[in-house]
Amino acid sequence: MQTFWRPPEHPAYPPTLGATYLGNGKCRFLVWAPHAQRLELKLVAPCEALRPMRPRGRGYFELTADGVEPGARYFYRLAGERDRPDPASRFQPDGVHAASAVLDPKFAWTDGLWHGIPLHQYITYEIHVGTFTPEGTFGAAINQLDDLLDLGVTAVELMPVAQFPGGRNWGYDGVHPFAVQNTYGGPDGLRRFVDAAHRRGLAVIMDVVYNHLGPEGNYLAEFGPYFTDRHHTPWGRAINFDDRGSDEVRRFFIENALAWIDAFHIDALRLDAVHAIFDFSARPFLQELADAVRQEGERLNRRVYTIAESSLNDPRLIAPKELGGCGIDGQWCDDLHHAVRTTLMEDLAGYYADYRGFDHLVKAYQDGFVHDGGYSEYRGRRHGSTARHVDPIRLVVCAQNHDQLGNRLFGERLTDLVSFEQLKLAAALVILSPYQPFLFMGEEYGETAPFQFFISHGDPGLAEAVRRGRKDEFASFEWAQEPPDPQDESAFQRCKLNHALKQSGRHRKLRAYYRRLIELRRTESPLAFPDRERMEIAVPAAGRALALRSWSADREVLIVFHVAADARMIHPPLRTGTWDKILDSADPVWAGSGSDLPQRLEAESEAGLNLPPYSVAVYRRACDAR
């Protein structure tokens, strides 16, 4: 019997919400429904039956039923008249409004020797299951894992797979947090995917949404005070993490997190938009969640992590709880992305108005957060706090992700927005940075399909509301064109990857270039184990170039990122010794135009590198132990 986390002040809590199959035709049902005077279990398949559930205090109802096997379909009947799916349903075979299904907990796992990987080894590759392959399923995604392994990534991040309405959605409209999307292959499909990834040494990150639920099929409010009027989010009333009844709401979402880890062997949870989680209690929900996940990992003898997405630039998220922080293991840092974008494109619309290209690129490398307490023009106030003291590996950076693509008018990728040399430069700025690198599906070979926003709501009025909302979101960017209709299936179909591209022309060479960057990241110790005390960042005179010098006990690496549109002579900071070139982005092997960078440098005060436009040069020297 799996033993889930329980709040210490409530030791009598049963172990598992939802339907737990106990074997021999027995199944226990547990639901929190304080709004219900009475509650009944309505079995609808393979036979029909209506059975009263027993109250057990604090708003919980329980029933252990005989003659119920895995696959049985059921509802909870509220007030003798309304049939609703289980809030903690493990599977919704027919969608968000239909009956829940009892899940067989047994699965033939083969990853018994898998214990996870250290955080510093994470090189993450984000996929949307529905558009990653033509089939849009976990099974089809398994067929691409060997290619990802060959690329060198170490973790695959799944955009949310909790059950959402219809078959087309980014996943952030999920309404059944415990259930795995039926059109992707359901819970068995996810278990097979995770097992296959672990066999290849790949970790799996699950994107979870604890700041809101989608609008269609969201019945939680009928069961209990899952939402509060004390706080509001862009999606409506906030989830209740600090009002009356919030103990049980916290329990619901923390048990959800632990179910992904225990039942599906997930290695890390990416926590969506935690700035929209409102909680002013003395012990914040996020701190309690991070504690519970850490303890579950220890119980299972696995490395398990939490990684938050936040727009607050607040290092307290990842500070230890003993120092007043939440104790989360890592957080997204969009500032490097924004600095790279404005360096290469000089795009100052919307939130890019806060970024000043190359100067902020240098600051992102030096400090992590660009906005660390200074004035934000976009927000009209001061924003952020310093992250200079933070272990850089705990900040996740990217050149592309689902938000930065999908929240553009037409979902264009960098492939369509910058030159090929700029594309290679952006990749190196992320992968060779001191931070934890993150790639979006298809970027490694220059995928040309866009990544647009798409939905498949059953309510026409709701679909129209989403259309209007998208237009309002784009207002600050002053885009004149109409955005694509997210409800139209063509928006979804346009986003399907074309994996055949990676075998031809520049696409093949770009993928090989990404593979080489990742190889350097993993094999060169100063890059694999970034340490602010073992690195120096400089801006050589007479050029728009950033030089990163980092070292370990036995070697030193120098990377020069040249972001100017013309060739320039750069004099990087070289220590005495012999330096060997290990990467030249202008080399024809990477579809570059060629350069005259020397294969070997003997460090001298006047040593210089004649760098082509938008290029990257990496040199290495052996050194004595320091």
Image (cartoon, rainbow, N blue to C red):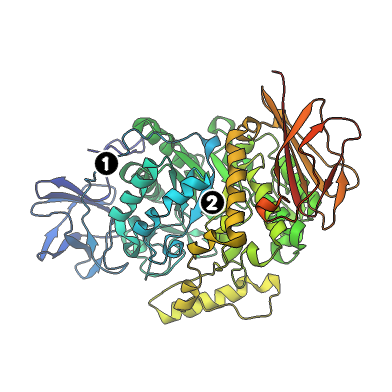
Q: Can residue 446 be seen in this view?
A: no
- Location of residue 75 by image quarter: bottom left
- Residue under numbered circle 1: 15
Query: Is residue 184 shown left or right of residue 385?
Result: left
Question: Taking 359 as reference, is 23 left or right?
Answer: left
Q: Identify the residue position indicated by label 2 in the image.
A: 274
Secondary structure beneath dot 2 equals helix
Tag 2: amino acid: Val
x and y, in percent, of residue 256 in the image: 36, 48
Q: Which of 180 and 2 is in front in this view?
A: 180
221, 573: nearer the viewer: 573
Q: Residue at x 77, y 45 (%)?
A: 362
Residue 120 percent across, percent down from the top left: 55, 35
Residue 107 visible to an observer of this rendering: yes
Near-viewer residue (52 or 213): 213
Mark 1: few/some/many CA within 10 Å (<14, 14-19, 20+): some
Which three-letter amino acid code belongs to the residue tagged 1?
Pro
